[in-house]
Amino acid sequence: DYVPLADGACWLPGFALPVMDELWSCVAQHLRIYPPQQMQTPMGYLMSVTTSSMGDWGWVSSANGYGYSAVNPATQQAWPPIPPVILHLASAAALKAGYAGFVPDSCLMNIYQAGNKMGLHQDKDEKDTSQPIVSVSLGIPATFLFGGSKRSDKTQKIPLHHGDVVVWGGHSRRFYHGVAQVKPAIHPLTGQQRINLTLRKAR
Ligand code: MD3
Ligand code: FE
């Protein structure tokens, strides 16, 4: 399926399911070796979601600001490479949405427990905004909130399920977005959590 959401954005329900076994084994192994951390926002708040990264650049946040780092702040070690199954999935999804040649250098994993949410925000830490962002949802469902270029714009509510992929490019790349409070649920692979992979060309 291919569901257009806005200028440049499209939803590919279940797009990751054909490679899920291999995808999940990479993600589960990564989370055992690189335990997700709760990042602090520049304003001094703790984010409710925990995060971990793969690729040349990992997204980090601290009292010093948001941005991309070549090393894990907890260990000062480089992040591991993005596994081929994830690179291939991201470029295939981008191509389906009309973006040829997408090669991400960052894979952020956001881990949501029941009750966690992500407030409306814009993604502004990447240099080249002509590159799309690809997101892959795993585990328990969540309602994704997708607004417009102004914080006050009305939001669409998109129910994202295990295996759904969304490609955000064009004007939608700058749109406000967030995740509504996740409801308690159990998924056979991930247990009580939702894991979102966000693939980006950070640099
Ligand atoms: C739409 N994460 O990490 S991924 C983030 O589900 C983030 O964890 C959410 O927003 C999550 O910054 C959403 C999907 C996503 C990512 C970037 C976007 C949607 C986007 C940028 C512009 C518009
Ligand atoms: Fe975002």
Image (cartoon, rainbow, N blue to C red):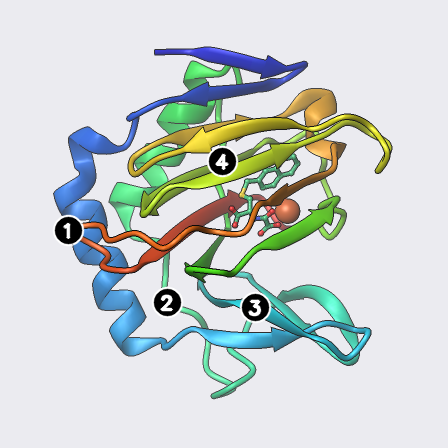
**Looking at the rendering, which quadrant does residue 38 occupy?**
bottom right
Q: Residue at the location (55% across, 61% down)?
A: 57
Residue on which disc 4 sits: 134
What's under tag 1, amino acid-wise? Answer: Pro
- The residue that label 3 is drawn on is 48
Under tag 3, what secondary structure? strand
**Closer to the observer: label 2 or label 3?**
3
Label 4 vs label 3: CA separation? 22 Å
| Mark 3 and mark 1: Cα distance apart in space | 23 Å
- Label 4 residue near ligand 1, CB within 8 Å: no
For disc 1, the marked residue is 188
- Labels 1 and 4: the sequence-earlier one: 4
Looking at the rendering, in which quadrant would you find the N terminus? top left
Q: CA distance from mark 2 to mark 4?
A: 19 Å
Q: Which residue is mark 2?
A: 80
- Ligand 1 within 8 Å of disc 3? The answer is no
Q: Residues within 10 Å of mark 4 (few under 14, many from 20)?
A: many
Under mark 3, the amino acid is: Ser
Above/below status of 1 relative to 180: above
Which residue occupies 82% across, 28% down?
153
Along the horizontal axis of the image, is 22 left or right of 123? left
Q: Is 24 or 87 nearer to us in this picture?
A: 24
Q: CA distance from mark 2 to mark 3?
A: 24 Å
- Contact? badges 4 and 3 (CB < 8 Å): no
Residue 193 occupies which quadrant of the picture? Answer: bottom left
Please state which of residues 131 and 5 is positioned toward the viewer in this rendering. Answer: 5
| Count of marks placed on residues | 4
